[in-house]
């Protein structure tokens, strides 16, 4: 039951941005939306899929495959979300932020590769699990990336309302 609830809530969180992203693609404009939640969906989906598979290979415990099953959809949808956002974004500041998120994501992924090459596999697995857990926290926090703009302009147009309501 717990595994099913875990998978269900993950998939709901991963599918929730779909209507908004389809609107971005159709209108070829992201407006004032920030890309952080979409990049986080991609990163979290890939991270949890990787961690689940890595843990399964290292331990042989089939239960870790639940992480793969529940996160693979997020990885695929995340690629679609980021692709649509990247090609629809017209705002230079928001584009620069998107590239910053790319760099941060690649740094974290690279750090894990270094950990896997230099640490014992059990320690590398622990480190990758920590990164996965941290990515679960950064998901909701990614919705706050535009708060300084909201306070500065006294306009809430940049808040990602569809994801904030979940």
Image (cartoon, grey):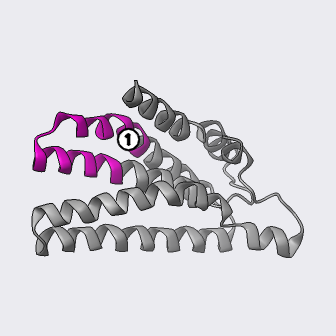
Taking the view exactly as shown, the residue that stands out farthest to the right is: 154
For the residue carrying disc 1, how many other residues have a C-alpha within 10 Å: few (<14), some (14-19), or many (20+)?
A: many
What's the magenta region? 47-75
In the picture, residue 150 is in which quadrant? bottom right
Extreme-front residue of the structure: 2
Quick one: quadrant of the N terminus?
top left
Examine the rendered structure and indicate whether residue 16 appears above or below residue 106.
Answer: above
Q: Position of residue 17 (x, y in %)?
A: 60, 42
Q: Position of residue 26 (x, y in %)?
A: 66, 41
Residue 37 seen by the camera:
yes
The residue singled out by tag 1 in the image is 71
**Which residue appears at 21% of the width and 68% of the height?**
113
What's the residue at 40%, 29% (across, down)? 2
Q: Which one is nearer the viewer's eye here, 123 or 73? A: 123
- Image location (x, y in percent) of residue 32: 74, 60
Foreground residue, 106 or 50? 50
User: Main SS type for the magenta part?
Assistant: helix
Asked whether residue 53 is drawn in magenta, I would say yes
Residues 91 and 135: in front is: 135
Tell me the SS state at disc 1.
helix
Give the x, y percent position of residue 59: 12, 46
Residue 87: quadrant of the picture = bottom right
Asked if residue 123 lies left or right of residue 44, the reply is: left
Verify whether residue 55 appears in magenta: yes
């Amino acid at each position: 039951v717990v595994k099913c609830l875990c998978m269900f809530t993950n998939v709901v969180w991963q599918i929730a941005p779909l209507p908004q992203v389809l609107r971005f693609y159709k209108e070829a404009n992201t407006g004032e939306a920030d890309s952080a939640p979409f990049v986080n969906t991609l990163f979290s989906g890939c991270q949890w899929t990787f961690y689940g598979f890595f843990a399964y290979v290292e331990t042989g415990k089939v239960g870790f495959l639940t992480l793969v099953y529940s996160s693979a959809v997020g990885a695929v949808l995340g690629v679609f979300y980021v692709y649509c956002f990247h090609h629809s974004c017209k705002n230079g500041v928001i584009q620069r932020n998107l590239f910053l998120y790319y760099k941060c994501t690649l740094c974290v992924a690279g750090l894990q590769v270094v950990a896997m090459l230099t640490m014992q596999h059990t320690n590398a697995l622990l480190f990758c699990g920590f990164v996965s857990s941290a990515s679960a926290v950064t998901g909701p926090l990614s919705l706050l990336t535009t708060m300084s703009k909201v306070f500065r302009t006294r306009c809430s147009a940049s808040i990602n309302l569809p994801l904030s309501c979940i």
